Image (cartoon, helix red, strand yellow):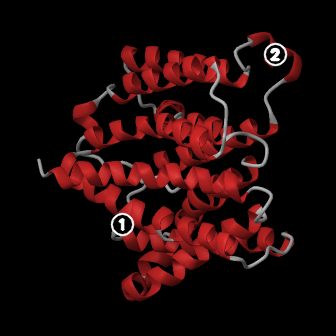
Amino acid sequence: MPIRYLLFSLLAVLIWVGNTLVSKLAAGTIPPGTIAFERWFIAFVILTPVVGWDAWRHRRTIASHLPKLVLLGLLGMAACQGLGYYAAAFTTATNMAIMLSLVPLLTLILGAVFFGERPSSLAIIGGVVSLSGIFVVLSLGDPSRLLSEGVGRGDAMMLVAVLAYAGYGILLRHWAIPLATWTSIYVQIGAAVVLLVPSYLLSGPSGFNLPNTAMVLYAAIPGSILAPFVWMSAVKHLGAARTAIFMNLIPILTAIVAAIFLSETLYVYHLIGGGMTVAGIIFVQRKSGCERSNQKTVPRGT
């Protein structure tokens, strides 16, 4: 296999790791509603000269599938990404990345509940291990803490965001929308921009300084355009199952980078819980590798 596609997978993962750090750095500096809107608005503007004509040519198809496309934009871009920015003010980048690693597991659960997809015994074991790891992280290594104090606000927001993205993935896989991938994404981004207008208007002002602008541009261009492009290129040439393994690097790399650049402390419960979560997800992703190798893996934009 061409090594560049392995590097494409790794590049996408590194961009998403950087995006998690940007979310944390933006907390307290840029209002969540502002960066969520500006990110997708800039991405929409950049994609318009490239994809806009194809969207116009297929406007009747878009109109007939508009409710589905709007719901996808709500779940995958507006809700998931927007909640991530709000959550960043209340939790660590490390916790955010560990929560994001639950996407394959939650996708499996939603598929079983709503579409009757039967998980294998290996996937069930992996799911139990992953959820146990999440409980270790959420409880800070002390399960009794969850009973007495509950889940932290930021972690709860991330769980909702991850659930929204899992819903996005399962709907995208089951809805056969007859549009080119980028045309579909373009319309979803447009829907997300419209849906995020209220939170943008209600957000406080943010200063247009160099760091703020750089964070928004990073989220808009590498995070929203480059990462999906190289990821989908890797999926096309390597297969979804093989490419998806690289997703397991996200919590590990995020924890390392956050410790270096954000001075976040890695505790034993991070290592134990994060390790259990990643190990469980590997089992989940192996549930039907042959089946998934012919399917598209949903690109992340978080």
Residue 140 location (% of width, % of height): 72, 20
- Relative depth, front residue between 79 and 272: 272
Residue sitting at x 84%, y 75%: 205
Amino acid type, mark 1: Thr
Classify residue 84 as left or right of residue 170.
Answer: right
Taking the image as shown, residue 270 lies to the left or right of residue 280, namely: right
Q: Residue at x 54, y 67 (%)?
A: 218
CA separation in Å, label 1 and label 2: 44 Å
Which residue lies at the image location 45% right of the left edge and 31% below the top edge?
116
Relative depth, front residue between 129 and 137: 137
Asked if one can make out residue 191 in the rendered structure from this viewpoint, the answer is no
Q: Amino acid at mark 2?
A: Arg
Q: Residue at x 53, y 83 (%)?
A: 45
**Residue with the most extreme left position:** 1
Return the residue at label 1. 181
Image position, residue 159 (x, y; %):
67, 38
Residue 221 is labelled as none
161 horizontally vs 173: left or right: right
The quarter holding residue 151 reads top right
Q: Nearer the viewer, residue 90 or 235?
A: 90
Residue topped by disc 2: 145
| Image position of 154 with respect to 195: above or below | above
